[in-house]
Image (cartoon, rainbow, N blue to C red):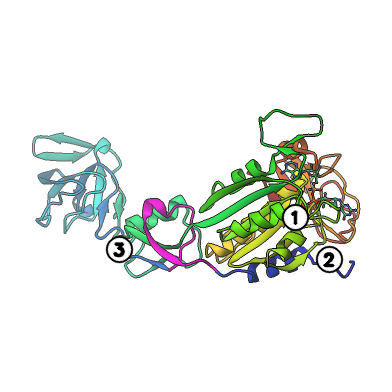
Amino acid sequence: MPPSLLSVAEAQTHLFALGAPVPIEVVPLRQAAGRWSAADVVALRTQPTTDLSAMDGYAVRFDDLAGPLTVIGESAAGRSFALPLAAGQAIRIFTGAAMPSGADSVLVQEEAVRDGDTVRLSGEGPVRGGNVRRKGLDFGAGETLVATGERLTPARIALAAIAGHGTLAVRRRLRIAVMASGDELVAPGAALTKDALPESNGVMLAALLADLPVEVINLGILPDRLDAIVAAFAQVDADILVTTGGASVGDHDLIRPALQAAGGTLDFWRIALRPGKPMLAGRLRDTVVLGLPGNPVSAFVTATIFLRPLVAHLAGAADPLPSPRHAILGAALPANDHRQDYLRAATHDGRVAPADRQDSSMVRTLALADCLIVRAPHAPPAALGDSVEVLLLG
Ligand SMILES: Nc1nc2c(c(=O)[nH]1)N[C@H]1C(S)=C(S)[C@@H](COP(=O)(O)OP(=O)(O)OC[C@H]3O[C@@H](n4cnc5c(N)ncnc54)[C@H](O)[C@@H]3O)O[C@H]1N2
Ligand code: MOO
């Protein structure tokens, strides 16, 4: 590998070192979804707090099932029956209601015949202890349910609620400024001249960030002029500044010089990666700067493997990197060179095959892909039917 190129893993390590997780705030559960927990979520209660019926029917003593049984009261969810059950007695009970003391099983109503205050078994009946949810079945008070740094998924939000929490400690939302650069670019949908190109990276990045706890600040399109880019950099007030375009070596590639002219520092530039080699990263005051290449697919891939993980890292994720999966190849692959490759691929009949052309300008091929095949530097040829690493695309 040419010595100036960082590996993808090295670049991720450098990037994470550029910023620490943002401050913690305590928010209501409804605002915590999709963030990362900033503290261990410990159960404040036992669930269930007592033995509960899992079915509508009759709470009974298993040894009395032969019956007939006298129904002496009712236990509903939220209105339990206070008295203990004596021999030969049953209690009408509903799903989620507390079991009366003395009862050990629930006879479902479909297997019972009721006649006034008497109930009789008409089917097979429960096993001993059947249809009862034991105290602490789900969790006990004091147990850690979500560890610091885990994502607050919908299920974990529900878990926190049922464990007694109304609020959770999370990292505050990140502010992410996004800026495109290039004289050829015009806003999507705007009138086009002969040399113009619709700007697609800004909306793509906003969509890629939509499920993350961020506020996206759209700085629009900047011309290929150093003074304009430096002036825009001077105004930035964000945790992350993402630029696209102007990252390479051409005369109009101005992001690196602009970063330095604005008083920022460059940490690294160029990665052994395809697509996305010219990506750069640095700092500008309190802002982490990520300069993505302009080619739309290069911007997409670098946003997937650097920007999203950076957001997760600054938002307090314990495990910020995307999780690769394994897939079976539906086509042979040649040996790889020194750059880690991310091939747009689609799944057919359970097998993944890369698109024939991997030009980093081709957005339609990206839209047709459902995963990226990850090829390590110098990977040997792979045969049809081999297992490969993939990143699934949403
Ligand atoms: N002599 C060399 N030339 C290039 C190299 C190199 O190493 N030596 N690297 C190539 C690679 S790899 C990439 S990737 C590109 C990326 O360069 P830039 O980041 O400077 O991107 P631009 O030149 O500004 O644009 C590239 C391409 O993408 C279009 N573009 C830019 N921004 C957007 C946007 N927001 N929405 C849609 N399309 C955009 C732009 O019009 C260009 O066609 O450099 C290679 N060159
Ligand atoms: O790396 Mo560039 O991103 O190959 O097109």
User: Percent from the top left, x then y, of residue 234?
Assistant: 62, 59
Residue with the mark numbered 3 = 46
Q: In this view, does 194 lie above or below 225?
A: above
Q: Report how far apart the C-alphas of labels 1 and 3 lie in the structure.
A: 62 Å
**Going from the N terminus, do you reach mark 1 or mark 3 first?**
3
For the residue pair 6 and 125, the one nearer the viewer reads as 6
- Answer few, some or many: residues within 10 Å of disc 3's Cα (few below 14, many 20 plus, some between 14 and 19): some
Residue type at tag 3: Thr
- Answer few, some or many: residues within 10 Å of disc 1's Cα (few below 14, many 20 plus, some between 14 and 19): many
Residue with the mark numbered 2 = 5
User: Percent from the top left, x then y, of residue 122?
Assistant: 24, 37
Q: Which residue is drawn at 62% across and 55% down?
A: 308
* Circle 1 SS class: helix
Q: Report how far apart the C-alphas of labels 2 and 1 lie in the structure.
A: 26 Å
| Of labels 2 and 1, the one closer to you | 1
Residue with the mark numbered 1 = 226
**Going from the N terminus, do you reach mark 2 or mark 3 first?**
2
For the residue pair 164 and 79, the one nearer the viewer reads as 164
Residue type at tag 1: Leu
The quarter of the picture where residue 226 lies is bottom right
